[in-house]
């Protein structure tokens, strides 16, 4: 009985020693690799990945420092710091937008900051894998009638926001993402007119700009310059001026009538010579008797 108890005690001591040794190994791994992470990627290409060892159960690496210039594999003081949480092995990746860093990663060829893509950290079997798809994305031009615009990229959502108007051509005014003509033609009977842009997508009423031949403009309308009117035994006309027509004026008389003032009267020929004129001829007879 005593021998059996002694064996159990020895086994317990051996198991305890093994557990303490394993815990010591994993504790050592948990504090390693607090160093700069260097990787190489190019704008728009497939991301590369590198591993940083952790422990076998989870990845607890603290802060990771990555070169801002992702194409630079050398030692640099220009760094971006990543602070991932404790990640369990096999858990979903910890993802950050490239645009969320300050300072941001930049493209070595252009020197421009990368405003799109993600940095993804994954823990697997105690190793951290870091991959990036960081890239530079520009606004895209958009067609607009009588103007120009762009489809703007928003780094906060890593997507385009849709086309928006940036400016209008000469003679047009921007409103509500469209270009409105400053002046448009409109209909005036027997003439022509325009409407001026009044703002907020509205135009003024039609304004007279000119009248057709034979018409006179007055009070935003076109009036016939001359109209016929009735004259007894003839014809007449009225002339437009200052919003009204003149009195009827004779323009001609019918056959057998002549104009007298502003009327047509019957034509009367001149009367024949009187008899007194013939007596003068008798004086000549008297002369013959002499």
Image: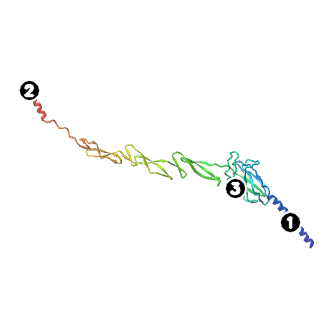
Q: Residue 5: image x %, image y %?
A: 90, 71
- Circles 3, 2 touching at the beta carbon (< 8 Å): no
Which image quarter is the N terminus in? bottom right
Which image quarter is the C terminus in? top left
Farthest-out residue, left? 289
Farthest-out residue, right? 3
Q: Secondary structure at mark 3?
A: strand
Mark 3 and mark 1: span between their CA atoms?
42 Å
On residue 41, which mark appears? none
- Nearest the viewer among 103 and 267 is 103
Q: Secondary structure at mark 2?
A: helix
Mark 3 and mark 2: span between their CA atoms?
150 Å
The tag earlier along the polypeptide, 3 or 1, is: 1
Q: Which numbered mark, 3 or 2, is in the foreground of this view?
A: 3
Q: Residue at x 8, y 28 (%)?
A: 286
Q: Secondary structure at mark 1?
A: helix
Q: How many marks?
A: 3
Mark 1 and mark 2: span between their CA atoms?
192 Å
Disc 3 target residue? 96
Disc 2 target residue? 288
The tag earlier along the polypeptide, 1 or 2, is: 1
Farthest-out residue, bottom? 1
Q: Residue at x 83, y 61 (%)?
A: 24
Q: Residue 161: image x %, image y %?
A: 61, 53
| Above or below, 248 relative to 53 | above
Question: Mark 3 Cα within 10 Å, few/some/many (few <14, many 20+)?
Answer: some
| Above or below, 44 relative to 24 | above
| Above or below, 255 relative to 12 | above
On residue 16, which mark appears? 1
């Amino acid at each position: 009985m005593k021998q059996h108890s002694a064996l159990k005690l020895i086994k317990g001591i051996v198991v305890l020693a093994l557990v303490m040794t394993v815990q010591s190994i994993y504790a050592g791994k948990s504090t390693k690799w607090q160093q700069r992470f260097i990787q190489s990627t190019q704008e728009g290409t497939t991301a590369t990945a590198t591993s940083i060892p952790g422990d076998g159960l989870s990845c607890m690496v603290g802060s990771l420092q990555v070169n801002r210039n992702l194409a630079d594999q050398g030692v640099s003081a220009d760094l971006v710091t990543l602070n991932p949480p404790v990640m369990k092995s096999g858990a979903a990746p910890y993802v950050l937008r490239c645009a969320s860093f300050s300072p941001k990663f930049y493209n070595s060829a252009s020197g421009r900051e990368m405003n799109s893509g993600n940095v993804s950290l994954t823990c697997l079997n105690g190793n951290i894998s870091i991959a990036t798809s960081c890239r530079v994305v520009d606004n895209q031009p958009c067609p607009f009638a009588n103007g120009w615009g762009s489809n703007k990229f928003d780094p906060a959502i890593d997507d385009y926001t849709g086309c928006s108007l940036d400016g209008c051509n000469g003679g047009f005014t921007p409103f509500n993402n469209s270009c409105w003509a400053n002046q448009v033609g409109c209909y005036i009977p027997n003439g022509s007119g325009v409407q001026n842009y009044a703002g907020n997508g509205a135009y003024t009423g039609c304004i007279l700009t000119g009248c057709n031949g034979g018409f006179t403009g007055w009070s935003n309308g076109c009036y016939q310059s001359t109209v016929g009117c009735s004259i007894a035994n003839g014809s007449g006309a009225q002339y437009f001026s200052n919003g009204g027509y003149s009195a009827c004026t004779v323009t001609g008389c019918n056959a057998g009538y002549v104009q007298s003032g502003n009327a047509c009267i019957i034509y009367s020929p001149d009367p024949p010579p009187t008899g007194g004129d013939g007596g003068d001829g008798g004086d000549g007879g008297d002369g013959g008797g002499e």
